[in-house]
């Protein structure tokens, strides 16, 4: 599990086949889980200045692999007892979105991101979402897109400041929203008003 707070911006040494090699200050152990741009990957080799991770075929088909170059967000998995400042994330990418608009406001930057219709059902006003591994809050939900406001410190301390319109983005929908949706489909006992109210408590 992760909480969507970026530990470090790592440098990509190479990405070939199913191996991603990163240069980073963080020193994991063999077998550790590391979220790279939000995708949970396993450490398979260690170096003095970084480590290698392995991407399964499933991972390579579900994430925006074109962004595994230059620099990436990394976050080590949570340990029991760690403080959670973001929200619980699994490192499982649900879909790839696209950044279609960047708009500055008085105390942040708005990102407008289009999403596949299959995950729009998990989007809720003021609900949580993982954007390339960063825990954010949804400010507005449209028919096929969402609006996020990124505060100045997050904008400075992540790769968001380098994002351009047209960038493909790894999306992880809220864990609670997914499970609640599955339960409502089975029991039909909850309305979406109930889901949204419970999400606020989460």
Image: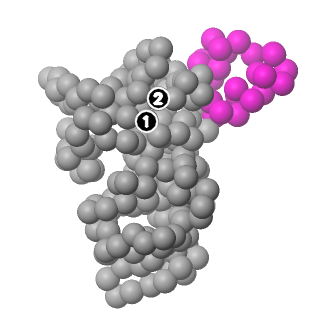
> Could you tell me which secondary element the residue under label 2 belongs to?
loop
Residue 195 highlighted magenta (yes or no): yes
Q: Please state the horizontal and vertical placement of residue 101, each as a whole percent of the image.
A: 26, 26
Q: Identify the residue at image location x=76%, y=21%.
A: 184
147 within the magenta span: no
Residue 50, quarter of the rendered image: bottom left
- Residue 130 place in picture, x, y as percent: 46, 41
For marks 2 and 1 on the same chain, the one whose residue lies earlier in the sequence: 1
Which part of the image, by quadrant, shows the C terminus? top right
Depth check: give the residue in front, 124 or 82. Answer: 124
Crowding at dot 1, Cα within 10 Å, few <14 / some 14-19 / many 20+, comes out as many
Q: Is residue 134 left or right of residue 172?
A: left
Q: Nearer the viewer, residue 70 or 136?
A: 70
Q: Is residue 110 left or right of residue 202?
A: left
Helix, strand or loop at disc 1?
strand
Q: Kindly tell me whether residue 201 is visible in this rendering.
A: no
What residue span does the magenta drawing correspond to? 176-201
| Residue of label 1 | 97
Residue shown at the point (31%, 62%) measured from the top left? 69
Q: Are marks 2 and 1 in contact (CB under 8 Å)?
A: yes
User: Which one is nearer the viewer's eye here, 144 or 139?
Assistant: 144
Measured along the vertical axis of the image, is residue 193 above or below residue 17?
Answer: above
Q: Is residue 193 visible?
A: yes
Q: Residues within 10 Å of mark 2 (few under 14, many from 20)?
A: many
Q: State how far apart marks 2 and 1 are (Cα).
A: 5 Å
- Note whether 43 is above or below 57 in the view shown: below
Left or right of residue 158, residue 52 in this image: right
Considering every residue shown, the one lying at the far right of the view is: 187
- Would you place residue 133 above or below residue 51 in this image? above
- The residue that mark 2 highlights is 115
**Residue drawn at 55 percent across, 52 percent down:** 61
């Amino acid at each position: 599990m992760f909480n969507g707070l970026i530990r470090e911006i790592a440098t990509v040494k190479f990405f070939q086949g199913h191996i991603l090699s990163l240069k980073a200050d963080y020193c994991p152990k063999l077998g550790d889980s590391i979220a790279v741009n939000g995708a949970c990957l396993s450490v398979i080799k260690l170096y003095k200045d970084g480590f290698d991770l392995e991407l399964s075929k499933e991972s390579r088909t579900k994430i925006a692999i074109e962004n595994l170059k230059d620099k990436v967000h990394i976050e080590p998995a949570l340990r029991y007892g760690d403080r959670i400042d973001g929200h619980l994330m699994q490192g499982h990418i649900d879909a790839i979105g696209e950044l279609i608009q960047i708009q500055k406001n008085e105390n942040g930057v708005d990102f407008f991101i289009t999403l596949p219709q299959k995950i729009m059902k998990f989007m809720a006003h003021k609900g949580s979402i993982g954007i390339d591994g960063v825990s954010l809050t949804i400010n507005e939900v449209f028919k096929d897109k969402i609006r996020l406001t990124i505060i100045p410190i997050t904008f400075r301390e992540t790769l968001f400041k380098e994002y351009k319109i047209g960038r493909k983005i790894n999306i992880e929908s809220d864990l609670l929203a997914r499970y609640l949706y599955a339960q409502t489909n089975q029991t039909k006992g909850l309305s979406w008003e109930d889901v949204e109210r419970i999400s606020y408590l989460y």
